[in-house]
Image (cartoon, helix red, strand yellow):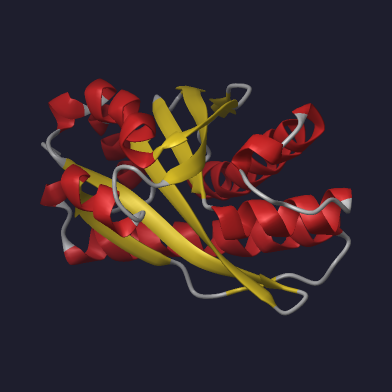
Amino acid sequence: MESYDSFNELQRDVIREIGNIGAGNAATALAGILNNKVSITVPQLQIIDVGEIVSVLGGPEREVVGVLVNMTDDVEGMLLYILDDEFVEMVTELLLGEPFDNYRSINEIGLSALKEISNILSGSYINALSSMTNLDIRLSAPEIAIDMVGAILNYPAAQFGEMGDKLLLIEEDFISGGNSVKSHMLIMPDLESLTLILNRLGVK
């Protein structure tokens, strides 16, 4: 495989199915954390230009929370969660019982909670992938930043520029307590790892 853009439809379907299973696991995990019922919409998988991701996320100057997790061992690469203010508001209000005014009002406890939730959500997807492929995939401790979309995307774009100008974007809506918030996750295994994943799943 030369780039994400070279996916055929069968390969896309397989990645979507991994996303579906991971999303179900993530909703269950999030419900346990928030002590509240959480449902989820069907995840949408896009193979998208790096430049288009900025527009999908609201423009280069929109402020968001970015959480980066590295994958190692059998699969090398990274996961990047982009959490917008609606997601952060749901977490801080339901989990911490604190109002969310703006990103500058998030204290260390709030940042730790966002990191932990991102870690658990990442684990939900990776556990699904690991179970389906019998691959050993380890996750690093999450790194968190509050910054503009353009700045947060600079690092993964630079790291994975050699794979082409396409990335995998999974989006879904988490619904809890009458609130619906969108999750944006960029999955970036390197191409050798991606080929291994597809081979383990019997997809050429």
In the picture, the quarter occupied by the N terminus is: top left
**Which residue is drawn at the image coordinates 61% and 57% (left, top)?**
87
Q: Is residue 4 visible?
A: no
Q: Is residue 101 above or below residue 115?
A: below
Query: In screen coordinates, is 156 left or right of 141?
Result: left
Where is residue 198? Give x, y as percent: 31, 46
Which one is nearer the viewer's eye here, 36 or 45? 36
Q: Is residue 109 above or below residue 45?
A: above
**Which residue is drawn at the image coordinates 12% and 35% (left, top)?**
164
Which one is nearer the viewer's eye here, 28 or 34? 34
Where is residue 181? Give x, y as percent: 58, 66
Which one is nearer the viewer's eye here, 124 or 116? 116
Where is residue 83? Give x, y as percent: 53, 48
**Which residue is drawn at the image coordinates 20% and 52% (left, top)?**
52
Q: Is residue 21 visible?
A: yes
Q: In terms of image quadrants, where is residue 152?
A: top left
Query: In screen coordinates, is 13 left or right of 180?
Result: left
Q: Is residue 25 above or below residue 134?
A: below
Which one is nearer the viewer's eye here, 181 or 11? 181
